[in-house]
């Protein structure tokens, strides 16, 4: 059981805080720049909160779960305690990494036991602490070096954020024609399910995979937005190339 | 119970043929340009097969489940029988439409009862036949006009084929670094699961959503392929715009 200070109160901090608390660790303080967010999460974790990092308590380590671009400036203010961040892409000397390879939304429950955690730290003792803490909440814990972690994060952006953006485009197209996004949900579920047993390149279907060039032309003409046309062209060219 | 001739023996023909057969319809002939494919599917449907459309039998209707680009030339050879095709984008005068809004791979089982079917035909009697046949295999049957069907198909290409291509990119990136695609599967599953209860625009996470501009820059630098850089830039710009 470790004593942990949590910096951040967004989606990642929320999910990790609750999982760590549930696994028996003590979150002894939540610090967030937004008072209400800090308070909201601290109440769920039965602990103190604050907005000022200079009033930080003492703990076994500090877990920084905030936007990538602000991690370095926050980390620079932590003295005499080991700290780790949850980012896939940030590199800071002396910082441990506690990166969950998952997409977290505040009110969507998920099974943390299945979430892959990518762990590393320069200090082997601290790395072991982070590995042990990760294993207390997940069955899927990896020691991953910096370059591999960055590749995993990049791949995750394509597989998760960009595929979700394709759902957004689809939803917008349907809305403009008064069609219900519900109609696409079985397709989206099946698309994700198929790759559990098939390589995505073998799972591919659709006009580009079938080389239906007339249909591709007609679909590009249906699109009104130039950026969408460009996205359609680029991704279609990739699928055609793979055949 | 209808007598149906099936033209095509690919993924869509396979799944529809087996479902229709299972629901009690009689597939009285399978015609495919490839003898082996026709034979393989016909054996499963306990029926005759052929490769020559001029030797077509008589049935209640013909179901054409082949590549979009070849539907018109095949349809032109069908005389004195109603026919329907399974394409989301093709328009042929006098053809009915029996379009399943789903991604089919030959050896991946799926629950046809949940598949949305988009049905239409110029002749109301034939349209009713198609609606009735669709309802015998699915609980999700819609009468959809041509323009709405084309929009649905375009949206499906983004939501299914293009998101699957994002999985392909991710798999390639991992392969080049000797990382296992298995690690991304919980993320892909969760990404698709989240939009069951959340609009995709509200489900978005990641560097662009968080406005982590430094991370975005670093990720673009990590990509070696110019087309991938262009795809990354375009989709990221879309997510940034939505904030």
Image (tube, coloured by chain):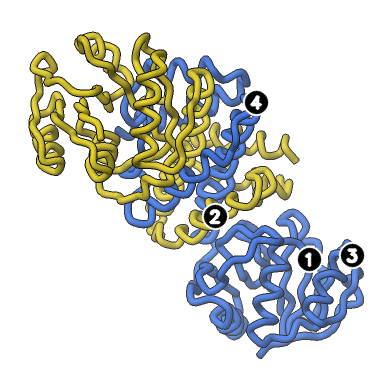
Chain colours: A blue, B yellow
Q: Are marks 4 and 2 on the same chain?
A: no
Quadrant housing residue A58: bottom right
Measured Cα–Cα span from mark 2 to mark 1: 23 Å
Closest to the camera, between mark 2 and mark 1, is: 2
Task: Please report, as a chain letter, where disc 1 is located.
Answer: A
Q: What element carries label 1?
A: loop
Mark 3–mark 1 contact, CB under 8 Å?
no
Closest to the camera, between mark 2 and mark 3, is: 2
Quadrant housing residue B49: top left
Q: How crowded is mark 3: few (under 14 residues within 10 Å), some or many (20 or more)?
A: some
Measured Cα–Cα span from mark 3 to mark 1: 9 Å
Q: What element carries label 4?
A: helix
Measured Cα–Cα span from mark 4 to mark 3: 37 Å
Quadrant housing residue B50: top left
Q: Where A171 sits versus A128, above or below?
A: above
Q: Do labels 3 and 1 share a chain?
A: yes
Q: Residue at the location (47% across, 49% down)?
A: A189
Measured Cα–Cα span from mark 4 to mark 1: 36 Å
Mark 2–mark 3 contact, CB under 8 Å?
no
Q: Residue at the location (38% across, 23% down)?
A: B97
Q: Are marks 4 and 1 on the same chain?
A: yes
Q: Where B162 sits versus A10, above or below?
A: above
Q: Which residue is situated farthest in the bottom direction here?
A: A1
Where residue A101 appears, x then y in whole percent? 55, 62
> What residue is disc 3 on?
A36
> What residue is disc 4 on?
A176
Task: Please report, as a chain letter, where disc 3 is located.
Answer: A
Where residue B225 appears, x then y in whole percent? 46, 37
> What residue is disc 2 on?
B193
Closest to the camera, between mark 4 and mark 1, is: 4
């Amino acid at each position: 059981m470790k004593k942990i200070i949590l910096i951040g109160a967004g989606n990642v901090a929320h999910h990790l805080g609750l999982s760590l608390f549930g696994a028996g660790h003590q979150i002894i303080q939540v610090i967030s720049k937004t008072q209400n967010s800090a308070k909201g999460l601290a109440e769920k974790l039965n602990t103190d909160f604050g907005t000022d990092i200079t009033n930080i308590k003492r703990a076994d380590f500090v877990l920084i779960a905030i936007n990538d671009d602000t991690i370095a400036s926050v980390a620079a203010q932590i003295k005499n305690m080991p700290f780790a961040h949850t980012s896939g892409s940030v590199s800071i000397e002396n910082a441990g990494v506690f990166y969950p390879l998952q997409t977290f939304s505040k009110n969507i429950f998920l099974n943390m036991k299945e979430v892959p955690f990518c762990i590393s730290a320069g200090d082997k003792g601290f790395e072991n602490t982070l590995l042990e803490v990760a294993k207390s909440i997940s069955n899927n814990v990896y020691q991953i070096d910096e370059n591999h972690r960055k590749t995993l994060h990049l791949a995750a952006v394509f597989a998760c954020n960009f595929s979700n953006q394709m759902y957004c485009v689809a939803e917008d197209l349907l809305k403009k024609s008064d069609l219900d996004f519900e109609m696409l949900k079985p397709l989206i579920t099946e698309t994700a399910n198929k790759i559990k047993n098939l390589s995505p390149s073998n799972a591919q279907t659709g006009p580009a995979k079938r080389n239906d060039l007339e249909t591709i032309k007609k679909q590009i003409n249906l699109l009104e937005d130039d950026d969408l046309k460009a996205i359609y062209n680029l991704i279609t060219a990739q699928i055609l190339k793979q055949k």
